[in-house]
Structure formats: C-alpha cells, structure tokens
Image (cartoon, rainbow, N blue to C red):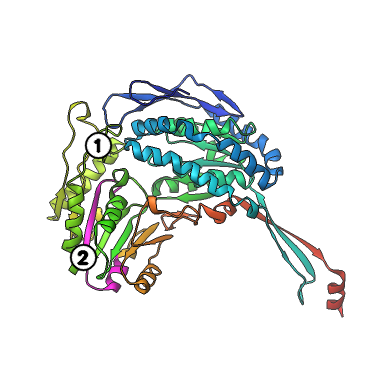
Amino acid sequence: MTDTTSTETAVRTGLFIGGEPRQTDETLTIVDPAKPGVIVGEAASASKQDVADAIAAADAAFPAWSALSATERATLMAEAIAGIADERDTDAAVLSQENGKIRFEGFIDALVFEIRWNLALMLADEVDTGKTLPVVPGIPVTTEVSYQPLGVVTVIVPFNWPIAILAAALPHALLAGNTAIVKPPPSAPLATTRIVQRVAEKLPPGVLNVVTGRDENMAELIQSPDVAKVCFTGSVNGGKRIMEMAAKTLTRVTLELGGNDAAVFLEDAVIDDVHLDRLFAAIYDSTGQICMNAKRVYVHRSRMDELVAGLEARLNRVVLGYGLDEGTTMGPLHQPAQKAFVEDIIQEAKDAGADVREYGTLPGGDLAGGNFLRPALVVDPDPSLRVVTQEQFGPVIPILPFDTEEEAVAAANDTWSGLCGSVWTADVEAAQRVGSQLVCGYVWVNDHGATRLDLRAPFGGMKQSGIGREQGIEGIRAFQDTRSIATIDPEALAAMAH
C-alpha cells in the first residue's frame, strides 16, 4: 500500500484474501471529485473468482475463529488494531481526495473506526453470556439459552463515512465469532482498503478479507449460500436491491439506509451560538452527505426569523474549496449525479416561488467544474416540494414554521423515513414528550448529527430507513443466533404425571 498526503502520489490498493494480498489485471480508476480529470489512485477490481475465493477463505477460517471464546477473540482484535493511528494523517488525506470531504473530517472518519472497535471489545464479557430458564410448574425442563455466531458476514459500506461506518458493524461481527468480507465503496475504496488490510494482516488468515471491484462481479457476496449475513449501509433503493438479492438464499440482512431527519425547535428553544453551531454542523457537515444529518427543520413561527438569521451568519462564513487546503470549510459533492439531483430540487423550489437563499462563492481555477454547490436555505417552502419530501444528501435544507406542538410532531412524522430526529427545547418534560412521539430509531435533545452519536447505543432506523441495529450489545446480538438446550427434570416430569 502506498502512502500519500497529497494529490501528487497515486494510491494503489489490492485485494486481501485468506491472509494474502492480491493484485488484479483490471482496476478501478478513482477520480478526484473536486478536480475534474485528476486521478487519485487505482483499486483492484475483483473477478467473480476472486469473490468466490474470499468467501471460501472466510468460510474456511470460521470454525477455528468461532471456537475461540469472545475474550480470546477480543485479545487478538486488540492486537490487530494496535498502531492503526500511525498512518491516520495519510489515511485522512487519501479519503479527502477520493471522497471530497475536508481533511479534518477524513481524520475523524478514521479516528471513529478505532473508537468503535475498542468500544466493541469492551463488551467481550457479555458476548458468550447466555441464560438459564429453570424448572417451573408445568414445564419440567431446565433450558440453557446460548448464543452462537452465524458464519461468514459481508459488510458493505458507502462513500460518505466509509471507515467510521464500517466499525459500526465489523468489530461486532468479528467479536461475535463470525468471519468477514468487507466491500468498500467502488467510487472511494482506497482509504478503507488501506485500513482494513492493515488490521486483517494481524488476524488469522481468512478471518478478515477485503474485496474491491465492480458491482456486477459482487453478487455472490450477497447471495452465496456460504454467506450467512449481509450488513449494508447506503440508500433506500440500494437496500431494497440488497434485500431482494439476499432473499434468493434467505440470507439475513442488517440495513442502515437513508433518512429525512426532522429537527423540531419548540417555542422555548435556546437559540444561541452554541446551539446554532450544533445545528449548522448537523445540517452541513460532509456537504450534507450524511444519512443522519438534519434534513428538515421545523421551528415555532415566533422563532423563525431568529433561527434563519443564525444559520445565515454561519453560511456567510463558508469557504468552498479543496478538502486538503487550509481554510476550506466545505468540499464538493462526491458524484456529479448527486450534484445534478440537488441542483434540480433547488431549482424546483425556485420555480415554485419558494424563498431560496444561497451562500458562498464557487471556486475557480483547477477546481472549476468540480462537484461544488453553494449551500442553501429554503425558507417556508410548500411541504410538497422534493426539498422537503426527499432526502437531499447535499448542502440545502428547508426551514418550515409551525404553530402548535401537535402540528410539529405530525409534520416531522409525515415521511417515509425513520432514522433520526431531534427536539430543541429548554423544557426537560417537553423534550421527553415530543422526543418519544418521533417515529425514528434515534432522538437527540438540543443536538443532532453524527458527531454527537453515542457510540455505545444501538443505532438503526424505522420505516424505510432500515432493518436491525448496529453498535452496543444489540449490535453484537445482530450477528448471533440463539440455541436452546432443554434437559428434562425427571422429578418434575413425574410430579406432572401424578
């Protein structure tokens, strides 16, 4: 693996299968979303046979790995993660170039991988802990309920926060006793592959594998009878495709999909610099390309102008530019298609007569033609516009007024999604009352966003935002099954006979 801290050095990554690196004749060319035509590096493009080999390697490693106790696996996993920070600056730079995000976010992306990994290891003592159901009147058995790993697990991650998102599932799957194959995003695989390979090299061969390549060669990672589970993070449509493919072999799935998160500001909300900074980050971090970002803001009509003014003050300070350049606060969107989609929904709002306000200056020079978009607010739009009803996944958000708490809750829940939400209020009771009515898997109070996620807590969506949970002991149990062993008690059986 090649180190790089600038665009001057191309990165080349291979596959890692059964404890061995592997190169391929075909490669994926990874381009810089900020600089049209600039190549960041190349990633190996796996053939169907490479994929089959990865599945076979993980399957072969499973018996020995699963036979270890959770504490033994935790010891090996702790050794494998040791020193992961040594190349973090380089990992961050590579991710910034292939993804478009600013360097600081790339650094945090890689840092969260280590944090989540170590938090998972802290649960080792709970992994193998089952329970005993004693003999009770009418049930003449003692039943031991234990947990067992599933087998080979495929973990598929998206482009936006690939390294951090990977660690919401991978260490939990491994600690539970499964072996794994990681599929990084084809448009931004380099930094993720670098990190996974460094960890995999320190684990027993086949326990952790990484395969990059074109989606048309990857089907068996999902529908092979030797794959026990697929953990996918991505779009709703992507999740539907994964579920349809997995159905062919009844492969289990965990799906962490998109969101249309509502932030609800009640009449007594504190709208000061601290809270506005939190809200701004929750909307515009990663140029709006985070599933759990705030996507709709509902604010009491009496506080509307105050909140809009606070966001405007911050938007006026945005510096659009290259992710590795000092002073840049917002990079480009990752894909030209996503830029076109966000431009389209903004134009639709303008055509409908909405109050659309755009900020910042598009960069020129060698960045002209990059996937840059000026961040925007859409103030008091018609709720039927796509900027309200669809996940923007870009630097634009609607601000909508409400008059009653009941109206706000109804509007927040009137959506296809159920990933996250937030309620902003100075009243603790109001926070609990409103928060408990939001139909979503995770609710913040006076805060919102990925940087504020409790990495110990189960995370996942309701409605079309997903199936299953990641993180915490719940995230480990998602990669296990239960086995019940019942032993008949002769005395209790005899008592029943009489």
Residue 223 in the magenta stretch? The answer is no
Q: Quadrant of the C terminus?
A: bottom right
Where residue 274 sits: x, y (%)? 28, 57
Q: Quadrant of residue 336?
A: top left
Where residue 434 sits: x, y (%)? 35, 70
Give the spatial CA distance, label 2 vs label 1: 34 Å
Q: Quadrant of residue 275?
A: bottom left
| Residue at image mark 2 | 401
Seen from the viewer's position, the closer of residues 34 and 303 is 303
Where residue 152 sits: x, y (%)? 61, 41
Q: Amino acid at mark 1?
A: Gly
Q: Which residues are magenta?
A: 392-411
Residue 398 in the magenta stretch? The answer is yes
Please identify the residue farthest to the bottom as the structure is shown.
498
Seen from the viewer's position, the closer of residues 165 and 444 is 444
Numbered badge on residue 327: 1
Identified at 43% across, 30% down, the residue is 190
Does label 2 or label 1 sit earlier along the sequence?
1
Where residue 447 sits: x, y (%)? 34, 59
Please identify the residue farthest to the top as the structure is shown.
25
Does residue 249 appear in this view? no
- Number of numbered discs: 2
Does residue 129 appear in this view? yes
Badge 1 crowding class, 10 Å Cα cut-off, few under 14, some 14 to 19, many 20 or more, is few
Badge 2 crowding class, 10 Å Cα cut-off, few under 14, some 14 to 19, many 20 or more, is many
Q: Is residue 472 above or below residue 221?
A: below
Q: Is residue 235 above or below residue 491?
A: above
Q: Amino acid at mark 2?
A: Pro
In what element is the residue under mark 1?
Answer: loop
In what element is the residue under mark 2?
Answer: strand
Identified at 44% across, 33% down, the residue is 88
